[in-house]
Amino acid sequence: MTEPKKDAEQHADSLSNEEKQDILNSFQRFQDYLKNKIHKGEKVGLDEEQLAKGAERVADYLNKHQEPENPEEKLLQEMWDVADKDEQRHLARILVRLAKEEGND
């Protein structure tokens, strides 16, 4: 069985800089990207908790490896930095819910 955190990091590392920038340049594109990944996760049977853990891994990766590209991402980064692990889990759940409700189809 593969390690989800390592898989997420490898996937993020496999994206070209151009692909990363395209996703990060617009908060709406970021939400759409996240919504797409959530939809794929739901198709393979991931529940809300597993989706939130995935969002937490993505947020952790972005916080460590990417500079915010817009004010919304800057706010998320600052919130992530001051949050403890439990609060980060809550933020991840909120991001999943936001992406599901607000992202474009």
Image (spheres, rainbow, N blue to C red):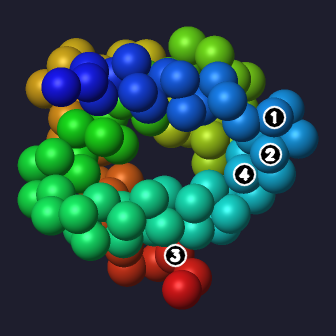
* Residue ID at (45%, 67%): 35
Q: CA–CA distance between discs 1 and 2?
A: 5 Å
Q: How busy is the neighbourhood of tag 2: few (under 14 within 10 Å), some, or many (20 plus)?
A: few
Labelled disc at residue 16 = 1
Q: How busy is the neighbourhood of tag 1: few (under 14 within 10 Å), some, or many (20 plus)?
A: few
Query: What type is the residue that disc 2 sits on?
Result: Glu
Query: What type is the residue that disc 3 sits on?
Result: Gly
Which circle's residue, 4 or 3, is located before the other in the chain? 4
Q: Is residue 13 visible?
A: yes
Q: Quadrant of residue 104?
A: bottom right
Q: CA–CA distance between discs 3 and 2?
A: 18 Å
Which circle's residue, 3 or 2, is located before the other in the chain? 2
Q: Label 3, on which residue?
A: 103
Query: What type is the residue that disc 1 sits on?
Result: Ser
Q: Label 2, on which residue?
A: 19
Name the mark nearer the viewer: 1 or 4.
1
Q: Are marks 1 and 2 in contact (CB under 8 Å)?
A: yes
Q: Secondary structure at mark 4?
A: helix
Q: Quadrant of the C terminus?
A: bottom right
Q: How busy is the neighbourhood of tag 3: few (under 14 within 10 Å), some, or many (20 plus)?
A: some
Q: Secondary structure at mark 3?
A: loop
